[in-house]
Image (cartoon, rainbow, N blue to C red):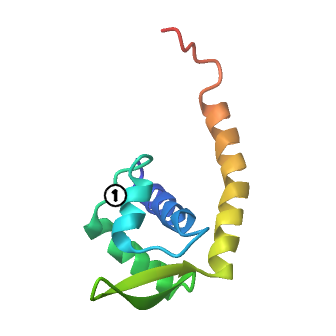
Amino acid sequence: MDVQLKRGLLDICVLASIKNEDSYGYKIIKDIKPYVEISESTLYPILRRLESAELLTVHSAEHNGRLRKYYHITHAGLERIAAFTEEWEEIMSIYKFVTRGEDTNE
């Protein structure tokens, strides 16, 4: 898969994983895992990039005596998910064009 395309898709997956509730790194990985494999070394740069782009915010809270970073989606992050949803329709249209006439029984 194209690196830039995969990067964009991972960004959207991370945003989608925190869309309904704040979350932390390990839980984000666990929530995404059934759909796409992502490691900590991949996730944390994505989280920093999304924070820099103001698509999410970070706050720390104590959990079992340790500070844990929680990620919260911003209004801009929600708008990015909505834009992706609209873009996905175009991507599916392109996919249908590229695969038109292919016999899936071969």
Q: Position of residue 56 (x, y in %)?
A: 54, 81
User: How crowded is the residue under tag 1: few (<14 C-alpha within 10 Å), some, or many (20+)?
Assistant: some
Residue drawn 65% across the image and 60% down it: 84
Q: Position of residue 48 (x, y in %)?
A: 40, 82
Residue drawn 52% across the image and 76% down it: 22
| Identity, as a three-letter code, of the amino acid under mark 1 | Ile
Would residue 61 be found to the left or right of residue 100 on screen?
A: left
The residue that label 1 is drawn on is: 38
Would residue 40 be found to the left or right of residue 70 on screen?
A: left
Residue farthest front in this picture: 64
Residue drawn 68% across the image and 80% down it: 75
Q: Within the image, what quadrant is residue 68 found in?
A: bottom left
Q: Within the image, what quadrant is residue 32 found in?
A: bottom left
Q: Is residue 20 above or below residue 70?
A: above
Q: Is residue 22 above or below residue 91?
A: below
Q: Position of residue 46 (x, y in %)?
A: 40, 73
Q: In this view of the protein, which residue sits in the foreground, 102 or 81? A: 81
Q: In this view of the protein, which residue sits in the foreground, 18 or 100? A: 18
Residue drawn 47% across the image and 87% down it: 58
Q: Position of residue 94 (x, y in %)?
A: 66, 40
Q: How many numbered marks, from 0 up? A: 1
